Image: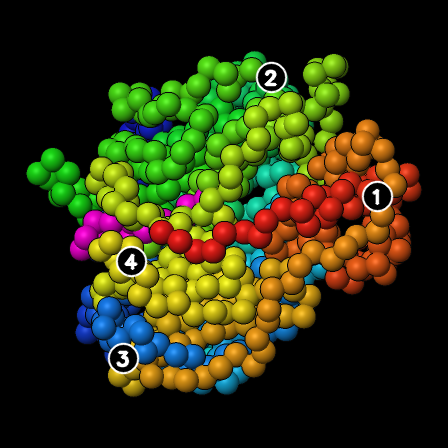
Amino acid sequence: MVSETGIAHVWTLRAGALLLGLSTVLGGQLWGEQSTDVADPERPARPAGWVDEARLVAAAEAESGSWLAHGQTYDELRFSTLTQINRDTVGELGLAWVKNLNIPFRLQATPLVIDGVMYFTDSWSVAYAVDARTGEEIWRFDPETDRRFMRYSCCGGPSNRGVAAYKGRVYFATFDARLVALDQATGEKVWDVDTTHYPTHTPYTITGAPRAVHGKVFIGQSSSEFGVRGHLSAYDADTGELAWRFFTVPGDPSKPFEHPELEEAAKTWSGEWWKLGGGGTPWHAIVYDAKFDQLIFGTGNGAPWPRKIRSPGGGDNLFLGGVMSVNPNTGRMNWFYQMTPADNWDFNAAQDIALLDIEVDGTMRSVLVQAPKNGFFYMLDREDGELLTAAPFMNQNWATHIDMETGRPVEHPEQYDENPKWVMPGNSGAHSWQAMAVDPNRGVAYVPVQEMAAFFRLPKSFLETGEYALNPDTMSLGVEFGRGEALPPKPEDKGFLKAIDALTGKILWSVRRATPYNGGALATAGGLVFQGDAAGTLAAYDADDGSTLWEYATQGSTPGSPISYELDGEQYLAVLVDRAWRREDSDGRLLVFKVGAQGEISKTLGDVAIPEPPPLTASEDDVRRGETLYNRVCVGCHGIGAVATINADLRMMTAETHERFQEIVRGGVLSDKGMLSFAAAVTEEETELIRQYVIAAAIRARAEPPPPRSRR
């Protein structure tokens, strides 16, 4: 096909990458040659808090004490060059200040620190500005997120991963899928737009942090599992007007395609996928590459998960499960590499992406690295998406290896069939949103890893009829979870922090954590790697060998990604902490540390055992029916196997909650807390079967040994 400029766009498939002529070349510019966005070196001093392209590009070398963007700088390495906190001094690290947030849900935001002010968001997308020295609140903005959208959380309640600061404003998204701009100095609202742009309600949510460049703010969305169609959007930073939108999956082919790339993508789909949404939501990773003036983002999983339902005639299903490069000004595609063609297991590639320059076969190359959910560590050339490295970083059973000639995974043949099976990694992925950190000097990535299998089987109704229908009241996964009684026992869940050679994918060292699903990482020039876990331990490891150098009991789950900053000659470490696992009497908070500080958390929490549940009155068959219903209706928020680490763990229900179970599930008496009525989804009898299944799960858990402690 030929562009309006007369330049041919040549589509090819090479090493798994779908290529379109580079828009940076078609536009006649590369970064720095001629751009009104890049400030002149002789410009007047910027106002306090001002962040623009020039500051972010220079930050890696000129501003080690700030944390200006989600991944620190445009390169998103999460590597601090500060050295005051190092191997020798980390043992003296103490609590400098605490900000209690009084919120029980997931705290996943990465704080920003700009000219002495810290900016962050909480679970319900409330934005804060505080003094980074003391925690004193400067302003707070509540966007009044519609809490009914909690129903559309795929993975345990609302969350928000932070803000973008750009030219005097702070931008963030809300869980009910709005994008908001605030005055950075005052916290006053400038504009607030609905990112869905649909005339009727759709279950779109947003959990990710926006990015900003070239006068635009970029945001994706979550919710693949609710039958939506993914897209990345660009908004005018001044007005909030939609500048462009890139759909990651094609829509109804009988209608005009929104952009030309979708015409080619539609050839890789079959059936009537558009009626099921297709998925592909770019819910997390967005990176701006200044060298090639391109926006790179990860695309989500297919929905429903099984390709046999979603695209019954086969096909790779572009643009699911891969890494996409687009022109930030126009939204036109440069290249696309697909990690998991015809995704079948929720193996999205929306995990964070880091940019660095590294020597490959004697030549310096500009590359990106990513550890997506499918369990293989990738390195791609940023200019054209060429695959350079693909190596496994965990035990997995869905593929044997990545074919370096084609760039495609070689799947185990048995994974094609319809038989129930344990799949490793499961839907949690080998690595999810928890940030990895990359030391560019060592060429090493530090990756939070979870080995958690999931039991997959196609729905009985689909196997019997060949038909599948979306349920508007529940997640439309297209699979049924279970314990797999007829299969070997489930593999043990394990969590690790792993150091991976970015060039080869070789694992250099691995630390076993106490819990399987843990927090993001921070690497520093002080020779340290920081990571928190769900058991409440924030730890510092030696970057050379993974030996433990410091631990702190946070009294809560620590899923967030730590940051480090410097003010008045003192280096700080900051991290958000969730409510303690299984503790209704604790709330989220922000913890900030520095060398020599001796502050304390106001309340120390002990372990809590699962209480003795009411008597189990259901038969074994009824408990199995209850499990099926639970997996259809409740699993998204309350966890597989009734094991929740974020939202309410139903096995912890009190006698009063058991008595009110019907009122809560069908009556909606907790709607103000996001627990809407499910009366349209389950009958009174079915609700009682779910409760009986939870009782059985509690009885089983009380008989199991406690989880392991942290160990190498």
Distance in Å between CA atoms under marks 4 and 1:
46 Å
- Do the residues under discs 1 and 2 have CB atoms within 8 angstroms? no
Element carrying mark 2: loop
Residue that appears at 34% across and 34% down: 392
Q: Nearer the viewer, mark 4 or mark 3?
A: 4
The disc at residue 434 is none
Magenta-span inclusion, residue 508: no
Element carrying mark 4: loop
* Residue 125 position within the rendered picture, expressed as x and y whole percent measured from the top left: 59, 64
At label 2, the amino acid type is: Glu
Q: Disc 1 designates what residue?
A: 616
Residue 566 vertical position relative to residue 431 in the rendered view, above or below: below
* Residue 325 position within the rendered picture, expressed as x and y whole percent measured from the top left: 36, 40
In the image, 46 versus 704, the foreground residue is 704
Element carrying mark 1: loop
In the image, 682 versus 258, the foreground residue is 682
Q: Earlier in the sequence, mark 2 or mark 3?
A: 3
Distance in Å between CA atoms under marks 1 and 2:
33 Å
Q: Disc 3 designates what residue?
A: 45
Q: Main secondary structure of the magenta part?
A: strand
Q: Disc 2 designates what residue?
A: 418
* Residue 693 position within the rendered picture, expressed as x and y whole percent measured from the top left: 78, 41
Q: Disc 4 designates what residue?
A: 547
